[in-house]
Image: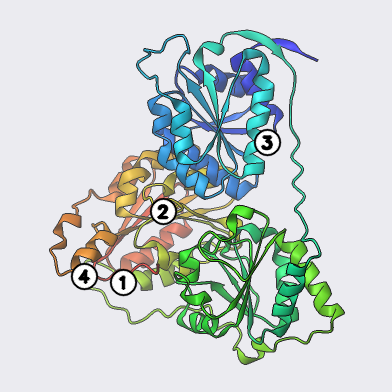
């Protein structure tokens, strides 16, 4: 049954009709009444951010952790342009989110904040939908949600401010997404793939972010082949507790796992686009048969051309391969019989060396891994510190891991941590950030975490420098002082923003910080003071 609504009410009702209960946003004149209606009329939860780009990052992490479409809202002009980095990050991270963006009135082209918003959105790779008329509000919102799910990227719905107080009929519109994955059709390509697998003596099964739902099928296939299992970074934790899990494939491998990968003769790649870091710029794939399976055609052949490519669902394809291997009575490879279980994913810690006033980073990560909650959601910002965190800090499953490095940016981590915390309010969120990244974006939203009462543990790898740039100066025997900074005390900053803050310059202080983590009752920040010359190089 239709009824008259103002457009701002219709937008709020439309997102509520799509099951949205949480809206991240920053209010302005083109979206504030919609936000009010979402909260007061629809019983929704509004999470106010400090910066517009934060809203996109929060919604992206929320979608990753919850599995639902994330929704954010900003107003027009500079509010949307402030989202460009976050939107690009979300696009490259395949985040299914909808951004409700206000726009300046069409009849006022000289509006101070007027800009071509379609061009801004298109430059990031996100999708664009226009709120066409007051009467099509429900259909336009439904189209945005549909596209976000099917295209696996952010969709920006552009909402002219002059529509908001216009009246129109509202009829509920929800486009149900049929998301059943496609099976691989019987074909010569499939026959050839099975032939390659059958003849392999050292096969390896690799899973990426597009194969998270296929854990059981992939482990069954690996066991049938007697092949080890590996993941890309985006699937970190998928094969936890499997004895022949070598963990992250590529430049983030242990030396033993890297050597094993080089020995393999056939790699079955499920749901991964095989970018340069995964393949070590192609070195790890040289001389091997590569079979790539992905439901997204665009994921195939981007950086590396496989011997055989199958556009199909990971789990269904694994089942089909298993079926034909059994039908043909193909013997297992015996590869795992050559391996020692549980040893391939363990990274060496090295000697404990640190000068006075700083601590050893790798040793600190080892202690943190032992002390941090096992049911945590791990979020990482960008920076030189991050690759050691990825290798040494565990997650219970891939959905409990959020990295903000799809665009190579820093300063995006704390915003994502807030979104993860809203998605999983009963679980601890652990964020690792660098000092530069925290200054760039973390300070903006730490107080948001305090206001929301999130169970957040922030760990700052603080070498008082931009580490990646510092090491380039050092490598060329140049003065690195331009990369170094005298930051404020992050522990004091955390306390001034309403949380707890602890500075760590020694092993004893680290032990005290870990005790404080166990007894925390508010967001807590641990400032690890590091020597920029002692932080390991990035493993990329």
Q: Position of residue 336 (x, y in %)?
A: 65, 86
The tag earlier along the polypeptide, 4 or 3, is 3
Q: Compare marks 1 and 3 and give the one earlier in the sequence.
A: 3
Alpha carbon distance from label 1 to label 3: 48 Å
Mark 4 surroundings: few (<14), some (14-19) or many (≥20) residues within 10 A: few
Badge 3: residue crowd in 10 Å (few <14, some 14–19, many ≥20): many
Q: Which residue bears the numbered disc 2?
A: 381
Question: Between 195 and 371, which is closer to the camera in this rendering?
Answer: 195
Task: Name the residue beneath numbered marker 4.
Answer: 475
When asked about the image quadrant of residue 1, the answer is: top right
Lateral position of residue 131 relative to residue 370, left or right: right
Q: Position of residue 498 (x, y in %)?
A: 38, 40
In this rendered view, identify the residue nearer to me: 297 or 98. 297
- Counting residues from the N terminus, which is met first, the one under dot 4 or under dot 1? 1
- C-alpha gap between disc 2 and disc 4: 24 Å
Q: Is residue 340 above or below residue 538?
A: below
Residue at 56% of width from left, 42% of height from top?
A: 422
Q: CA distance from mark 2 to mark 3?
A: 30 Å
Dot 1, how many residues are within 10 Å of its Cα: few (below 14), some (14-19), or many (20+)?
many
Q: Residues within 10 Å of mark 2 (few under 14, many from 20)?
A: many
- Give the number of the disc on residue 379: none
In this figure, which residue is indicated by the disc labeled 1? Answer: 360
């Amino acid at each position: 049954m239709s009824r008259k609504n103002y457009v701002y009410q219709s937008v709020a009702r439309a997102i509520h009709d799509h099951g949205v209960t949480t809206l991240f946003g920053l209010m302005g004149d083109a979206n504030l009444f919609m936000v009010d209606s979402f909260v007061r009329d629809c019983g929704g939860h509004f999470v106010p951010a400090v910066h517009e780009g934060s809203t996109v990052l929060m919604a992206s992490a929320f979608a990753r952790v919850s599995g639902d479409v994330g929704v954010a809202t900003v107003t027009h002009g500079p509010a949307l342009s402030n989202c460009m980095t976050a939107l690009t990050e979300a696009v490259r991270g395949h985040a299914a989110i909808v951004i409700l963006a206000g726009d300046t009135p069409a009849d006022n082209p000289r509006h101070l904040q007027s800009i071509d918003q379609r061009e801004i959105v298109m430059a990031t790779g996100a999708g664009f939908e226009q709120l066409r008329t007051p009467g099509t509000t429900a259909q336009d919102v439904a189209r945005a949600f549909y596209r976000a799910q099917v295209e696996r990227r952010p969709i920006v719905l552009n909402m002219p401010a002059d529509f908001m107080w216009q009246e129109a009929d509202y009829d509920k519109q929800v486009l149900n997404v049929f998301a059943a994955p496609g099976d691989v059709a019987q074909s010569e390509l499939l026959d050839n793939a099975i032939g390659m697998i059958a003849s392999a003596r050292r096969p390896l099964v690799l899973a990426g972010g597009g194969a998270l739902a296929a854990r059981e099928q992939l482990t069954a296939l690996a066991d049938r082949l007697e092949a080890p299992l590996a993941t890309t970074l985006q699937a970190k934790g998928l094969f936890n507790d499997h004895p022949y899990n070598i963990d992250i494939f590529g430049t983030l491998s242990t030396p033993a796992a890297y050597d094993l990968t080089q020995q393999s003769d056939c790699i079955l790649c499920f749901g991964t686009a095989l970018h340069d870091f995964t393949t070590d710029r192609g070195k790890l794939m040289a001389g091997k048969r590569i079979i790539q399976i992905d439901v997204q055609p665009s994921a195939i052949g981007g950086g590396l051309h496989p011997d055989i490519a199958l556009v199909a669902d990971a789990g269904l394809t694994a089942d089909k391969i298993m079926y034909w291997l059994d039908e043909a009575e193909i013997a297992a490879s015996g590869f795992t019989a050559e391996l020692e279980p549980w040893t391939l994913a363990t990274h060496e810690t090295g000697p404990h060396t640190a000068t006075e006033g700083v601590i050893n980073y790798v040793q600190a990560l080892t202690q943190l891994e032992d002390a941090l909650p096992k049911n945590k959601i791990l979020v990482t910002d960008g920076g030189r510190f991050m690759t050691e965190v990825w290798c040494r800090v565990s997650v219970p499953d891939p959905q409990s891991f959020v990295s903000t490095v799809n665009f190579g940016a820093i300063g995006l981590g704390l915003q994502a941590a807030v979104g993860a915390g809203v998605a999983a309010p009963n679980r601890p969120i652990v964020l690792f950030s660098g000092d530069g990244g925290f200054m760039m974006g973390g300070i903006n939203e730490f107080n948001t975490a305090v206001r929301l009462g999130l169970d957040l543990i922030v760990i700052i790898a603080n070498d008082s420098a931009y580490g990646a740039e510092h090491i380039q100066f050092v490598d060329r025997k140049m003065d690195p002082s331009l990369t170094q900074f005298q930051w404020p005390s992050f522990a004091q900053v955390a306390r001034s923003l309403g949380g707890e803050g602890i500075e760590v310059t020694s092993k004893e202080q680290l032990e005290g910080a870990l005790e404080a983590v166990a007894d925390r009752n508010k967001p807590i920040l641990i400032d690890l003071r590091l020597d920029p010359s002692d932080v390991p190089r990035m493993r990329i």
